[in-house]
Image (tube, grey):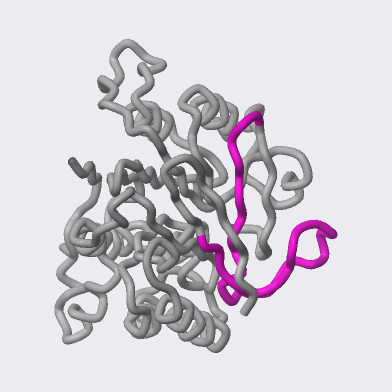
Amino acid sequence: MVFVALVMLGRAGVRADDSGAQLGRLNNRLNIAAIRKLRPQPDGSFSFIVLGDNRNGDATYKRLVARINRYADAHTGAGKPLFMLHTGDMVPSGTLSEWRNFAQLRGALKMPVVFVPGNHEMRAREGAADYASIVGQPLLAFDFAGCRFIGLDNTGGRFSARGIQFLRQYLGLPPTDAAGPAPVTPQPRSFLFFHEPPYVGRWRVHAMKPDNLGGHGGEMLQAAADAHVSAVLLGHIHLYDAIRIGDVPYIISAGGGAPLYGKYGFGHAHYGFLVVHVEPVAISWQWIDL
């Protein structure tokens, strides 16, 4: 069964011209429907790509799309990526013209993509409304090949109470509030993806708000630990980096085209993308430089 918390393209101003079909490439519900038609290997193995933060780096993003297509064409079986997760900051500020431009760029990618919002999508006055109309609701969950993928929204540097309850529900954990939604049946493996990294360790230089300022990141960390999440996939800090918190890997893949953050002195500040390999007894990942 597939769980989805999304809306269709519905804002009249967004669909009133011939760009509606192009914008439809960005609709999460349509992309998840396409993923549902895909098939893993007979043993359940498959691969997928993670990328974020192309923003205003159109020339680099075009090269990345071409590189991803070549990578997919060159691989078969479980090593061939089937879809992509985008961890946010697709556009500079969330204007309609920027979304139309990004839809054209995305059209060259030969696989479905599921998006979560970044902080840049929300900068325009109608940013949140246009995101909902074009992409969908910012909280989502879907299942594929025995895995659950849960997309969250922390674009204001914080998780909302609703977002934490949504996370717990789809991880199969009881609600923190007795009035919260009942948990659903968990999957053996779960992947979380959202934009801003938690306020931990070396990532504090450019992360979401700490808990004492209302970030609620600690609640996310605890839920991920309690549910033994397979991986948490992130953006926002423009580089590749990975840490472990307990037994859960947290991985930043934010080399999509925005200016790189080599200034922080950690991680791998190169343009590129992450490939995650899911196998019956393990998951692994590799970073592919552009």
Q: Which residue is painted at 59% across and 28% down in the image?
A: 218
Q: Nearer the viewer, residue 186 or 141?
A: 186
Residue 84 drawn at (x, y percent): 40, 64
Looking at the rendering, the stretch of residues picked out in magenta corresponds to 246-275
Residue 147 drawn at (x, y percent): 35, 42
Q: Which residue is painted at 55% across and 88% down in the image?
A: 59
Is any atom of residue 133 visible in this view?
Answer: no
Is residue 141 one of those drawn in magenta? Answer: no
Is residue 264 one of those drawn in magenta? Answer: yes
Q: Residue furthest top?
A: 178
The quadrant in which residue 39 appears is: bottom left
Is any atom of residue 81 visible in this view?
Answer: yes
The quadrant in which residue 103 appears is: bottom left
User: On the rendered structure, is 127 left or right of 272?
Assistant: left
Residue 271 drawn at (x, y percent): 64, 75
Q: Which residue is painted at 60% across and 71% down in the image?
A: 288
Residue 3 to residue 180: above or below: below
Q: Which residue is painted at 64% across and 75% down in the image?
A: 289
Q: Nearer the viewer, residue 47 or 13?
A: 47
